[in-house]
Image (tube, helix red, strand yellow):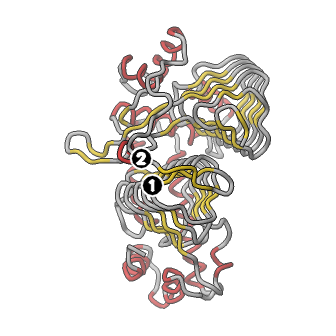
Amino acid sequence: MNYSVGKKLAHLVNGLKFKVDEIEEIRKLYSGEPFNPNDEGIKKLIETSRTLCEKFSSLGAKRHRTRFGYHIDQIKRIFVLRKLFCGRFMLADVRSGIDLIVGLVDAPSLTFFNYDVHFGAALVTMGRGVEIAPKVKIGDQESILSYAATGLPRTNIGKDAWLGLGVEVKSGTNIGDECVIGAGAVVDSDIPSHMLAVGRPAAVKREINRHEKESRYGKGSPFSAEEESKLLEAVRKWSKMSEIKFHCILSGWQFNLLDAKLMALYNATHAISESLNDANVTEEQKEEGKDLLFPLKGENFKMGSGVHVDMLGTAKIGDNVTIGDRAIFGGNIIIGDNVEIGDDASLFASGHPIYSKRRKMIFSWRHGVVQIGQNDLIIVESGVKIGKNAIITPGSVVTMDVPDGAIYVKNKIV
Protein backbone atom coordinates (compact mmCIF):
# COMPACT_ATOMS: atom_id res chain seq x y z
CA MET A 1 0.00 0.00 0.00
CA ASN A 2 1.19 3.54 -0.69
CA TYR A 3 1.05 4.69 2.91
CA SER A 4 3.45 2.23 4.52
CA VAL A 5 2.30 -0.46 6.92
CA GLY A 6 4.86 0.75 9.45
CA LYS A 7 3.38 4.25 9.54
CA LYS A 8 -0.11 2.84 10.03
CA LEU A 9 0.99 0.64 12.90
CA ALA A 10 2.80 3.60 14.47
CA HIS A 11 -0.45 5.56 14.21
CA LEU A 12 -2.34 2.80 16.03
CA VAL A 13 0.19 2.83 18.88
CA ASN A 14 0.76 6.57 19.16
CA GLY A 15 -2.61 7.96 18.04
CA LEU A 16 -5.15 5.31 19.03
CA LYS A 17 -3.33 3.90 22.10
CA PHE A 18 -2.93 0.32 20.89
CA LYS A 19 -0.34 -1.75 22.74
CA VAL A 20 2.69 -3.00 20.86
CA ASP A 21 1.71 -6.62 21.52
CA GLU A 22 -1.73 -5.94 19.93
CA ILE A 23 -0.50 -5.05 16.44
CA GLU A 24 1.25 -8.17 15.06
CA GLU A 25 -1.90 -9.67 13.54
CA ILE A 26 -2.93 -6.19 12.36
CA ARG A 27 0.41 -5.98 10.54
CA LYS A 28 -0.54 -9.17 8.68
CA LEU A 29 -3.99 -7.71 7.93
CA TYR A 30 -2.48 -4.53 6.48
CA SER A 31 0.03 -6.57 4.45
CA GLY A 32 -2.61 -8.75 2.80
CA GLU A 33 -1.41 -11.87 4.64
CA PRO A 34 -3.56 -14.46 6.44
CA PHE A 35 -4.32 -13.40 10.02
CA ASN A 36 -5.91 -14.70 13.20
CA PRO A 37 -9.59 -13.66 13.27
CA ASN A 38 -9.77 -14.26 17.03
CA ASP A 39 -6.87 -11.93 17.82
CA GLU A 40 -7.75 -9.27 20.39
CA GLY A 41 -5.92 -6.59 18.41
CA ILE A 42 -8.00 -7.31 15.31
CA LYS A 43 -11.20 -7.17 17.36
CA LYS A 44 -10.10 -3.89 18.93
CA LEU A 45 -9.34 -2.43 15.48
CA ILE A 46 -12.83 -3.28 14.23
CA GLU A 47 -14.53 -1.83 17.31
CA THR A 48 -12.38 1.32 17.30
CA SER A 49 -13.17 1.89 13.62
CA ARG A 50 -16.90 1.50 14.22
CA THR A 51 -16.78 3.97 17.11
CA LEU A 52 -14.88 6.57 15.07
CA CYS A 53 -17.27 6.29 12.10
CA GLU A 54 -20.27 6.71 14.39
CA LYS A 55 -18.66 9.71 16.09
CA PHE A 56 -17.94 11.34 12.72
CA SER A 57 -21.58 11.02 11.66
CA SER A 58 -23.00 12.06 15.04
CA LEU A 59 -20.99 15.30 14.98
CA GLY A 60 -22.57 16.12 11.62
CA ALA A 61 -26.08 15.30 12.89
CA LYS A 62 -25.97 17.67 15.87
CA ARG A 63 -28.33 20.64 15.85
CA HIS A 64 -26.40 23.88 16.41
CA ARG A 65 -27.76 27.09 17.85
CA THR A 66 -24.77 29.13 16.71
CA ARG A 67 -22.45 29.13 13.71
CA PHE A 68 -19.51 28.98 16.14
CA GLY A 69 -20.74 25.67 17.54
CA TYR A 70 -21.13 24.29 14.04
CA HIS A 71 -17.55 25.21 13.11
CA ILE A 72 -16.18 23.69 16.32
CA ASP A 73 -17.83 20.39 15.49
CA GLN A 74 -16.50 20.57 11.92
CA ILE A 75 -13.00 20.85 13.37
CA LYS A 76 -13.71 17.85 15.59
CA ARG A 77 -14.79 15.90 12.51
CA ILE A 78 -11.44 16.67 10.86
CA PHE A 79 -9.63 15.17 13.84
CA VAL A 80 -11.81 12.05 13.70
CA LEU A 81 -10.97 11.69 10.00
CA ARG A 82 -7.30 11.99 10.84
CA LYS A 83 -7.66 8.98 13.12
CA LEU A 84 -9.64 7.01 10.53
CA PHE A 85 -7.03 7.66 7.84
CA CYS A 86 -3.97 6.95 9.98
CA GLY A 87 -2.88 10.46 10.82
CA ARG A 88 -3.27 12.02 7.38
CA PHE A 89 -4.87 15.45 6.80
CA MET A 90 -5.08 14.71 3.10
CA LEU A 91 -8.78 14.44 2.30
CA ALA A 92 -10.44 17.34 0.50
CA ASP A 93 -13.93 16.46 1.70
CA VAL A 94 -15.79 13.57 3.34
CA ARG A 95 -19.53 13.55 3.96
CA SER A 96 -21.39 11.70 6.69
CA GLY A 97 -22.04 7.98 6.55
CA ILE A 98 -18.40 6.97 5.99
CA ASP A 99 -17.84 3.32 6.92
CA LEU A 100 -14.35 1.79 6.93
CA ILE A 101 -11.73 -0.04 8.99
CA VAL A 102 -8.78 2.11 10.07
CA GLY A 103 -5.77 1.47 7.86
CA LEU A 104 -7.49 -0.37 5.01
CA VAL A 105 -8.00 2.67 2.76
CA ASP A 106 -5.22 4.81 1.28
CA ALA A 107 -6.67 8.12 0.10
CA PRO A 108 -4.25 10.89 -0.94
CA SER A 109 -4.81 14.61 -1.32
CA LEU A 110 -7.80 16.09 -3.17
CA THR A 111 -9.98 13.03 -2.72
CA PHE A 112 -13.74 13.41 -2.33
CA PHE A 113 -16.15 11.00 -0.63
CA ASN A 114 -19.81 11.94 -0.80
CA TYR A 115 -22.60 10.80 1.51
CA ASP A 116 -22.88 7.18 2.78
CA VAL A 117 -19.74 5.57 1.30
CA HIS A 118 -18.91 2.06 2.55
CA PHE A 119 -15.56 0.27 2.33
CA GLY A 120 -15.66 -3.50 2.78
CA ALA A 121 -13.20 -6.38 2.88
CA ALA A 122 -10.33 -5.10 0.73
CA LEU A 123 -7.08 -3.17 0.93
CA VAL A 124 -8.02 -0.09 -1.11
CA THR A 125 -5.50 2.23 -2.75
CA MET A 126 -6.70 5.40 -4.51
CA GLY A 127 -4.93 7.84 -6.76
CA ARG A 128 -5.05 11.58 -6.38
CA GLY A 129 -8.32 13.29 -7.32
CA VAL A 130 -10.68 10.31 -7.01
CA GLU A 131 -14.35 11.29 -6.63
CA ILE A 132 -16.91 8.99 -5.05
CA ALA A 133 -20.64 9.72 -5.25
CA PRO A 134 -23.23 8.81 -2.58
CA LYS A 135 -24.05 5.20 -1.66
CA VAL A 136 -20.93 3.72 -3.22
CA LYS A 137 -19.63 0.39 -1.88
CA ILE A 138 -15.97 -0.52 -2.38
CA GLY A 139 -14.85 -4.01 -1.45
CA ASP A 140 -17.07 -6.99 -0.68
CA GLN A 141 -19.61 -5.97 1.94
CA GLU A 142 -18.88 -8.67 4.49
CA SER A 143 -16.72 -8.95 7.58
CA ILE A 144 -12.97 -8.79 7.06
CA LEU A 145 -12.81 -11.84 9.35
CA SER A 146 -14.12 -14.03 6.52
CA TYR A 147 -10.80 -13.37 4.70
CA ALA A 148 -8.62 -14.44 7.63
CA ALA A 149 -7.40 -17.63 5.94
CA THR A 150 -6.41 -15.97 2.66
CA GLY A 151 -5.66 -12.35 3.54
CA LEU A 152 -7.49 -9.33 2.17
CA PRO A 153 -7.47 -8.79 -1.61
CA ARG A 154 -6.27 -5.50 -3.03
CA THR A 155 -8.47 -3.04 -4.92
CA ASN A 156 -6.95 -0.12 -6.81
CA ILE A 157 -8.73 3.00 -8.08
CA GLY A 158 -6.67 5.17 -10.41
CA LYS A 159 -6.13 8.90 -10.21
CA ASP A 160 -8.97 11.23 -11.26
CA ALA A 161 -11.46 8.36 -11.48
CA TRP A 162 -15.12 9.12 -10.80
CA LEU A 163 -17.47 6.53 -9.30
CA GLY A 164 -21.12 7.44 -9.81
CA LEU A 165 -24.08 7.08 -7.48
CA GLY A 166 -24.61 3.60 -6.05
CA VAL A 167 -21.59 1.97 -7.72
CA GLU A 168 -20.33 -1.31 -6.25
CA VAL A 169 -16.67 -2.28 -6.66
CA LYS A 170 -15.88 -5.89 -5.81
CA SER A 171 -12.76 -6.81 -3.85
CA GLY A 172 -9.69 -7.53 -5.95
CA THR A 173 -10.72 -5.42 -8.96
CA ASN A 174 -8.84 -2.49 -10.46
CA ILE A 175 -10.17 0.72 -12.00
CA GLY A 176 -7.77 2.67 -14.20
CA ASP A 177 -6.87 6.35 -14.25
CA GLU A 178 -9.52 8.90 -15.29
CA CYS A 179 -12.30 6.32 -15.61
CA VAL A 180 -15.97 7.12 -15.12
CA ILE A 181 -18.15 4.35 -13.67
CA GLY A 182 -21.85 5.02 -14.32
CA ALA A 183 -24.52 5.12 -11.63
CA GLY A 184 -25.50 1.75 -10.20
CA ALA A 185 -22.75 -0.19 -11.99
CA VAL A 186 -21.22 -3.28 -10.40
CA VAL A 187 -17.49 -3.55 -11.11
CA ASP A 188 -16.41 -7.20 -10.86
CA SER A 189 -13.52 -7.12 -13.35
CA ASP A 190 -10.74 -4.69 -14.19
CA ILE A 191 -11.59 -1.47 -16.09
CA PRO A 192 -8.74 0.00 -18.21
CA SER A 193 -7.78 3.65 -17.90
CA HIS A 194 -9.73 6.44 -19.66
CA MET A 195 -12.90 4.36 -20.07
CA LEU A 196 -16.60 4.92 -19.42
CA ALA A 197 -18.11 1.75 -17.93
CA VAL A 198 -21.76 1.06 -17.12
CA GLY A 199 -24.03 -1.84 -16.25
CA ARG A 200 -24.42 -4.78 -13.89
CA PRO A 201 -21.82 -6.17 -14.32
CA ALA A 202 -19.94 -3.10 -15.52
CA ALA A 203 -18.76 -3.23 -19.11
CA VAL A 204 -16.67 -0.70 -21.01
CA LYS A 205 -18.94 1.42 -23.18
CA ARG A 206 -16.33 3.61 -24.86
CA GLU A 207 -13.12 5.55 -24.38
CA ILE A 208 -13.28 9.04 -22.88
CA ASN A 209 -11.51 11.88 -24.68
CA ARG A 210 -11.11 15.64 -24.52
CA HIS A 211 -13.88 16.20 -27.09
CA GLU A 212 -16.62 14.97 -24.74
CA LYS A 213 -19.87 16.92 -24.99
CA GLU A 214 -21.97 17.48 -21.90
CA SER A 215 -25.73 17.12 -22.14
CA ARG A 216 -27.31 19.99 -20.26
CA TYR A 217 -25.03 23.01 -19.92
CA GLY A 218 -27.01 26.21 -20.22
CA LYS A 219 -30.38 24.72 -21.16
CA GLY A 220 -32.26 27.08 -18.88
CA SER A 221 -33.87 26.88 -15.47
CA PRO A 222 -36.67 24.27 -15.18
CA PHE A 223 -38.53 26.51 -12.73
CA SER A 224 -40.83 29.45 -13.45
CA ALA A 225 -39.70 32.96 -12.50
CA GLU A 226 -42.06 32.91 -9.51
CA GLU A 227 -40.81 29.50 -8.35
CA GLU A 228 -37.20 30.51 -8.80
CA SER A 229 -37.81 33.65 -6.74
CA LYS A 230 -39.27 31.57 -3.91
CA LEU A 231 -36.35 29.14 -4.05
CA LEU A 232 -33.85 32.01 -3.96
CA GLU A 233 -35.62 33.45 -0.91
CA ALA A 234 -35.15 30.09 0.86
CA VAL A 235 -31.50 29.89 -0.22
CA ARG A 236 -30.70 33.35 1.13
CA LYS A 237 -31.55 32.24 4.65
CA TRP A 238 -28.27 30.33 4.52
CA SER A 239 -26.13 31.97 1.86
CA LYS A 240 -25.73 35.44 0.34
CA MET A 241 -25.77 33.97 -3.15
CA SER A 242 -26.52 36.39 -5.96
CA GLU A 243 -29.62 35.96 -8.08
CA ILE A 244 -27.51 35.61 -11.24
CA LYS A 245 -25.29 32.88 -9.77
CA PHE A 246 -28.30 30.95 -8.43
CA HIS A 247 -30.05 31.19 -11.80
CA CYS A 248 -26.93 29.85 -13.55
CA ILE A 249 -26.82 26.86 -11.19
CA LEU A 250 -30.48 26.03 -11.88
CA SER A 251 -29.89 26.52 -15.62
CA GLY A 252 -27.20 23.84 -15.77
CA TRP A 253 -24.14 26.01 -16.27
CA GLN A 254 -20.84 24.85 -14.83
CA PHE A 255 -20.07 26.33 -11.42
CA ASN A 256 -17.34 26.27 -8.80
CA LEU A 257 -18.31 23.64 -6.25
CA LEU A 258 -16.08 25.19 -3.61
CA ASP A 259 -17.28 28.77 -4.00
CA ALA A 260 -17.64 30.15 -0.47
CA LYS A 261 -21.32 31.11 -0.85
CA LEU A 262 -22.19 27.81 -2.46
CA MET A 263 -20.31 25.89 0.23
CA ALA A 264 -22.30 27.76 2.89
CA LEU A 265 -25.48 26.51 1.23
CA TYR A 266 -24.15 22.94 0.92
CA ASN A 267 -23.09 22.89 4.56
CA ALA A 268 -26.42 24.25 5.75
CA THR A 269 -28.34 21.70 3.63
CA HIS A 270 -26.30 18.77 4.87
CA ALA A 271 -26.51 19.94 8.48
CA ILE A 272 -30.32 20.12 8.19
CA SER A 273 -30.48 16.68 6.54
CA GLU A 274 -28.22 15.08 9.12
CA SER A 275 -29.96 16.73 12.06
CA LEU A 276 -33.15 14.90 11.04
CA ASN A 277 -31.29 11.61 11.59
CA ASP A 278 -30.80 12.38 15.28
CA ALA A 279 -32.64 9.83 17.41
CA ASN A 280 -33.94 12.63 19.63
CA VAL A 281 -35.44 14.77 16.86
CA THR A 282 -39.09 15.67 17.49
CA GLU A 283 -41.98 15.56 15.02
CA GLU A 284 -42.08 19.35 15.09
CA GLN A 285 -38.39 19.50 14.18
CA LYS A 286 -38.96 16.99 11.36
CA GLU A 287 -41.68 19.21 9.90
CA GLU A 288 -39.44 22.24 10.21
CA GLY A 289 -36.61 20.40 8.45
CA LYS A 290 -38.92 19.28 5.66
CA ASP A 291 -40.02 22.89 5.10
CA LEU A 292 -36.40 24.04 4.93
CA LEU A 293 -35.23 21.31 2.56
CA PHE A 294 -38.20 21.57 0.18
CA PRO A 295 -39.46 25.16 0.00
CA LEU A 296 -41.55 24.31 -3.09
CA LYS A 297 -43.90 21.53 -2.06
CA GLY A 298 -47.58 20.69 -2.42
CA GLU A 299 -50.20 19.38 -0.02
CA ASN A 300 -49.95 16.10 1.89
CA PHE A 301 -46.18 15.64 1.51
CA LYS A 302 -44.84 12.72 3.57
CA MET A 303 -41.12 12.14 4.08
CA GLY A 304 -39.39 9.24 5.84
CA SER A 305 -36.34 9.34 8.08
CA GLY A 306 -32.74 9.64 6.94
CA VAL A 307 -33.56 11.55 3.74
CA HIS A 308 -30.48 13.34 2.37
CA VAL A 309 -30.68 16.44 0.19
CA ASP A 310 -27.52 17.65 -1.56
CA MET A 311 -28.55 21.31 -1.95
CA LEU A 312 -31.79 22.94 -0.88
CA GLY A 313 -33.48 25.30 -3.30
CA THR A 314 -33.27 22.96 -6.31
CA ALA A 315 -36.42 20.81 -5.98
CA LYS A 316 -40.16 21.05 -6.54
CA ILE A 317 -42.56 18.55 -4.95
CA GLY A 318 -46.18 18.09 -6.08
CA ASP A 319 -49.31 17.13 -4.11
CA ASN A 320 -49.70 13.77 -2.36
CA VAL A 321 -46.05 12.78 -2.60
CA THR A 322 -44.50 10.16 -0.32
CA ILE A 323 -40.73 9.72 0.06
CA GLY A 324 -39.41 6.65 1.88
CA ASP A 325 -36.56 6.32 4.34
CA ARG A 326 -32.95 7.14 3.41
CA ALA A 327 -33.76 8.56 -0.03
CA ILE A 328 -31.15 10.83 -1.66
CA PHE A 329 -31.84 13.92 -3.78
CA GLY A 330 -29.31 16.00 -5.69
CA GLY A 331 -29.49 18.47 -8.57
CA ASN A 332 -32.66 19.92 -10.07
CA ILE A 333 -35.55 17.59 -9.15
CA ILE A 334 -39.20 18.06 -10.19
CA ILE A 335 -41.70 15.54 -8.80
CA GLY A 336 -45.31 15.52 -9.99
CA ASP A 337 -48.50 14.78 -8.05
CA ASN A 338 -49.34 11.39 -6.52
CA VAL A 339 -45.78 10.07 -6.68
CA GLU A 340 -44.48 7.40 -4.31
CA ILE A 341 -40.74 6.94 -3.78
CA GLY A 342 -39.53 3.86 -1.87
CA ASP A 343 -36.86 3.40 0.78
CA ASP A 344 -33.21 3.91 -0.24
CA ALA A 345 -34.17 5.27 -3.66
CA SER A 346 -31.89 7.90 -5.19
CA LEU A 347 -32.65 10.75 -7.58
CA PHE A 348 -29.30 12.33 -8.22
CA ALA A 349 -28.73 14.88 -10.99
CA SER A 350 -25.63 16.58 -9.59
CA GLY A 351 -22.49 15.80 -11.50
CA HIS A 352 -19.27 16.82 -13.18
CA PRO A 353 -17.86 16.83 -16.70
CA ILE A 354 -17.00 13.35 -17.98
CA TYR A 355 -13.55 14.35 -19.27
CA SER A 356 -11.27 14.30 -16.23
CA LYS A 357 -9.31 17.45 -17.08
CA ARG A 358 -12.55 19.48 -16.85
CA ARG A 359 -13.64 18.10 -13.49
CA LYS A 360 -10.21 17.84 -11.88
CA MET A 361 -9.79 19.50 -8.50
CA ILE A 362 -7.08 22.16 -8.50
CA PHE A 363 -5.55 24.45 -5.90
CA SER A 364 -5.13 28.20 -6.25
CA TRP A 365 -3.93 30.71 -3.64
CA ARG A 366 -6.92 32.93 -4.38
CA HIS A 367 -9.73 30.36 -4.28
CA GLY A 368 -8.23 27.34 -2.46
CA VAL A 369 -9.36 23.94 -3.74
CA VAL A 370 -11.56 24.45 -6.78
CA GLN A 371 -13.65 22.02 -8.80
CA ILE A 372 -16.24 22.52 -11.51
CA GLY A 373 -19.66 20.90 -11.17
CA GLN A 374 -23.06 21.06 -12.83
CA ASN A 375 -26.75 20.61 -12.05
CA ASP A 376 -28.70 18.42 -14.41
CA LEU A 377 -32.45 17.73 -14.20
CA ILE A 378 -34.69 14.82 -13.22
CA ILE A 379 -38.47 14.98 -13.76
CA VAL A 380 -40.83 12.40 -12.22
CA GLU A 381 -44.26 12.64 -13.82
CA SER A 382 -47.50 12.35 -11.83
CA GLY A 383 -48.68 8.96 -10.62
CA VAL A 384 -45.29 7.24 -10.86
CA LYS A 385 -44.08 4.76 -8.25
CA ILE A 386 -40.31 4.41 -7.73
CA GLY A 387 -39.31 1.23 -5.90
CA LYS A 388 -36.85 0.58 -3.09
CA ASN A 389 -33.13 0.97 -3.90
CA ALA A 390 -33.94 2.32 -7.37
CA ILE A 391 -31.56 4.83 -8.98
CA ILE A 392 -32.71 7.64 -11.29
CA THR A 393 -29.87 9.12 -13.33
CA PRO A 394 -29.34 12.71 -14.58
CA GLY A 395 -31.41 13.88 -17.53
CA SER A 396 -34.21 11.38 -16.89
CA VAL A 397 -37.92 11.99 -17.36
CA VAL A 398 -39.63 9.19 -15.44
CA THR A 399 -42.93 8.32 -17.08
CA MET A 400 -43.38 4.75 -15.82
CA ASP A 401 -43.12 2.82 -12.56
CA VAL A 402 -39.55 1.84 -11.66
CA PRO A 403 -39.14 -1.59 -9.99
CA ASP A 404 -37.15 -2.20 -6.81
CA GLY A 405 -33.40 -2.00 -7.40
CA ALA A 406 -33.68 -0.86 -11.03
CA ILE A 407 -31.64 1.86 -12.75
CA TYR A 408 -33.64 4.37 -14.81
CA VAL A 409 -31.52 6.04 -17.50
CA LYS A 410 -33.03 8.88 -19.55
CA ASN A 411 -36.38 7.28 -20.45
CA LYS A 412 -35.87 3.56 -19.93
CA ILE A 413 -35.08 0.97 -17.30
CA VAL A 414 -31.73 -0.77 -17.63
The first of marks 1 and 2 along the sequence is 1
Disc number for residue 332: none
Residue 369 image point, x, y percent: 30, 46
10 Å crowding of disc 2: few (<14), some (14-19), many (20+):
few
State the residue at coordinates (78%, 44%). 404
Of residues 160 and 81, the one nearer the viewer is 160
Q: CA distance from mark 1 to mark 2?
A: 8 Å
Looking at the image, residue 41 lies above or below residue 216: below
Of residues 322 and 22, the one nearer the viewer is 322
- For label 1, the SS is loop
Looking at the image, residue 19 lies above or below residue 336: below
Q: Mark 1 near mark 2, Cβ–Cβ under 8 Å?
A: yes
Looking at the image, residue 64 lies above or below residue 290: below
Of residues 162 and 96, the one nearer the viewer is 162
- Residue at far top of view: 226
Residue at numbered disc 2: 209
Residue 193 seen in the current view: yes
